[in-house]
Image (tube, grey):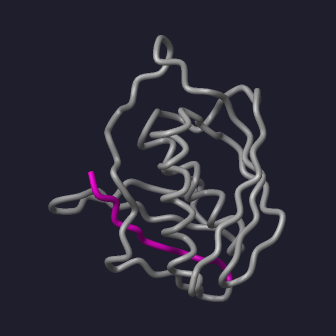
Amino acid sequence: MSTQPFEIVSHTADIAMAVRGRTLAELMANAGCALYSMLLGPCNSTEQIERTVVVDSIDRDALLVDWLNELIYMVDVEQLAFARFEIVHMDDTRATVRCFGHPIDETHHRLKRDIKAATHHMAQIESDGSEFTARVILDI
């Protein structure tokens, strides 16, 4: 696995992320960090709050997209940013994640870009036996 667990990938009309992880759980956590990196900058923050998030979906590809959309919702509506994710439970259709972060303070945080949603278009998780990889297109 490369040293960076995610990278920003160019895409014609939107933006995409390529995410890696040794396990499916690590891939999900790295996808959360990648999203916040694109929204707010480096994935680091004080851990002032903890939130448990449960996401149910039809398969693991959709689960990743739904997970990212839940995080986008928490930025947009609840004004929360997370920097660390602890996967409590994970299977192909359900994830329970403890999220650690802080409220977004507009005097100290400025959104780098507005991300409307993670899309199902071309979203796919793959595994080569040693790591999981995924690419997700984000609507900006």
Q: Which secondary structure dominates the residues rendered in magenta?
A: strand
Q: Is residue 39 above or below residue 93?
A: above
Q: Quadrant of residue 102?
A: top right
Residue at image coords 57%, 61%: 2
Whether 71 is among the magenta residues is no
Residue 40: x and y in percent read 46, 33
Q: Is residue 67 left or right of residue 118?
A: right
Residue drawn at the location 51% of the way across and 59% of the way down: 68
Residue at the front extreme of this rendering: 77
**Looking at the figure, which quarter contains the N terminus?**
bottom right
Of all residues, the one furthest to the left in this rendering is 12
Q: How many numbered marks does the figure carry?
A: 0
Left or right for 102, reference 136: right
Q: Position of residue 81 (x, y in %)?
A: 59, 36
Position of residue 24 measured from the top left corner of the image (x, y, whole percent): 68, 74
**What is the x, y in percent for residue 91?**
74, 81
Extreme-top residue of the structure: 107
Tell me the quarter of the picture where residue 60 sits: bottom right
Q: Quadrant of residue 82?
A: top right
At 39% from the left edge and 30% from the top edge, which residue is drawn?
111
Residue 95 as seen in the image, left or right of residue 118: right
In the picture, measured across the screen, residue 122 lies left or right of residue 135, that is: left
Q: Could you say which is closer to the camera, residue 42 or residue 111? A: 111
Q: Nearer the viewer, residue 139 or 135?
A: 139
Please say whether residue 134 is one of the residues in the magenta stretch. Answer: yes
On screen, residue 42 above or below 24? above
What span is in magenta? 130-140
